Structures are given as C-alpha cells and as structure tokens.
Amino acid sequence: MDLRGAAVLGVVLLMPAVSGRAADDESVPLAEFGFEPTAAGVRQCLARLTPGEEEVQRIAALIEQLDDDDYFTRERATRQLARLPSIPAGTLAEAMKHPSLEVRCRARRLAVIHSSERPQGILKAALGAVVEQKLEGLAPAILTAMRNDPDAPVWKLAQQAVSVTVCNGGPQGYLRTKEAFADYVLSLQWRMPTNTSDSGVGLMMTGPDQATPSCLEVQIHAANSGDFYIIGGFHAEAAGQKIPFRSNKLQPSNEKPPGEWNTMEMLVSGGNVEVKINGLVQNKATGCARQPGKINLRNEGSPVEFRNILLLPLEG
C-alpha cells in the first residue's frame, strides 16, 4: 500500500491529510510564501498565522509606511505585507478607509492577495513541508494555528497544553470530521481523570448527524478500552460472527492508570478493522461496509482529553 501522506489532525475539526504537491492539487511549496521548509521555518510560518501583539504592532507600522514620502519605502512595506501569512481581520478594511488615496489603493491590492483562502493555502503548504521533510515536534504549533469549532462548545483547547483537545462532558454527542475517509491508519493518545470516565472513537460513520449515528465505536473506558460497540445499526463481524451490540477485546486490559496518557492505533482497510491499545492488538472486526466514512470522538458526558491525533490515508 502507498502512504500518500500524514498530517496532524486539527484539535477541533480533524483535518484531511495532505501530501505536499499532489498531482490533482493546487498547493504550492512553503518557500513560495517566504518560509524555508524546515522545522524553524514551519514554526515561524504558523506563528504568523496567529499574530501576537508584537506582530500586530509591526503590521500597523507597515500599514503606516504605505503613505511614506519615499516611494521605495512604500513599495518595500507593500511587499512585506503581501508576503505575510495572515493579517488580522479588519486591519485592511480600516486601511481602505485611510485618508490617503495611496494607502487605500495599496490596501485594496493587499486585500485581494489576502483572500480567505490564503491562510488555508499556507497551512496546507506548512503541513506538506512537515510530511515531505519528515519534520517532528511541530504538533503544538500546528494545532495552535487552527481554530476552535464554534459549534462544539463542550470541546476546547487546553490553555496550558495547546496540543490537547479537552471534552468537559456536558450533553452527550460527538466531534466529527467534515470529510469522509476510506482506508487509513488513525493514531491518537487519550487520558481520563477517573476510572468512571467514558468515551470512544467512532469509525466509518455514515448518514446524517444524530444522537446515535451509524458507526463502529472503539470503546474508551477503564478496563474496557478496545471493546467494539455497534452504533446505529452498523454491521461488523468478529471471529466470523455478526456483532450484535458489543465485542469484547481479545486480551486483558492494558490501559494505564487515570491521569496517564494511553495510545490507540486503528487500522481501517478493506472493510476490516484492527485496534491496538498501547501497542497490543486488542480487537479485530471484519465484514464492515467498504465505503468512506467520517471519524468522530465520542462525548459520553464525562471528561476526556485527546492529543497527537494522526491520520495516514492508505491508497493502492
């Protein structure tokens, strides 16, 4: 099989993997945005997508230079603004109201360059560099550059650990991908504060959003992590028999104590599913419908944290 690419999945919306400059893609190399395809270059690029106070002040200063008496200063400021990954919302709108006609005209040109698609294109280029150069240790920077989903209020980024997705409990439901995926390897880490916390990962989800969408749930629960649950009439088999509702894991429980991070790896290929918990194969399913499906993280009403969510699409 061909691993087309790997990408760290967003903390609020799981993001499809990218593979740099694919044949059917219009993505461009990171260098074309003015950043080197190195770990340092990716960090710098992603930091610019969410500019801090110092960067905001620098942008404001460059905007003022658009009205400088010196032509070359105006040109240099325009080029620097054009190459920025992101300009805070409203900044160019205000510049287009500037008393100076020169500033207004240059701001209009910059607004065309900084369309809504530009940040996504830059983020895609950064992820492509991570994949192609096999860069490591960039998950926190990538996740910080992504935005929270306003439609999922019970999920949030941990303030002290930006690479962690936190579910605080509350009304039951799930956080799902926007896209559907076919064959893939999905890896993630999770931890729970107590032995009574409950969650899960829904694979091959199809149909409309509802309380119990059709999917195969991989259970996350003390002493039961790795069990399969049939949700919404999903069809799967274990040991040659249809799973009526639940299929227990194959080995004794091997989760770590509450508060410690566990690793789950899920291989979905050709209608088959294999689940590893902390490196040990804990369950297998066969006979699943071979069609693209969405992925969801379950909220069963209790706190749970996820991090280092990684998707590897399989093709060929």
Image (tube, grey):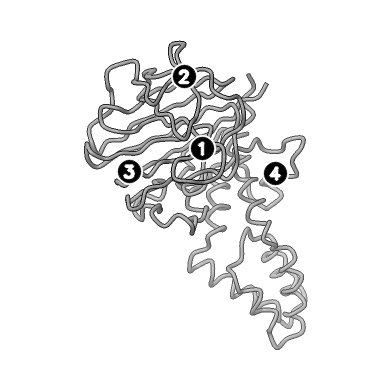
Name the residue rendered at 59%, 75% in the picture: 60
Q: Which three-letter amino acid code belongs to the residue tagged 1? A: Ile
Q: Which residue is mark 4?
A: 29
Q: Earlier in the sequence, mark 3 or mark 4?
A: 4
Q: Mark 2 Cα within 10 Å, few/some/many (few <14, many 20+)?
A: many
N-terminal of the two: label 3 or label 1? 1
> Mark 3 highlights which residue?
304
Instruction: Tell me the element at label 1.
Output: strand
Which residue corresponds to the image point at 63% horizontal and 46% vertical from the top-left? 124
Q: Residue 228 appears at what percent x and percent y?
A: 39, 26
The residue positioned 37% from the left and 21% from the top of the image is 247
How far separated are the C-alphas under marks 3 and 1?
A: 17 Å
- Tell me if label 2 and label 3 are in contact, CB under 8 Å: no
List the residue tagged with mark 1: 295
The residues bearing labels 3 and 4 have C-alpha atoms spaced at a distance of 37 Å
Please say if 80 is above or below 209.
Answer: below
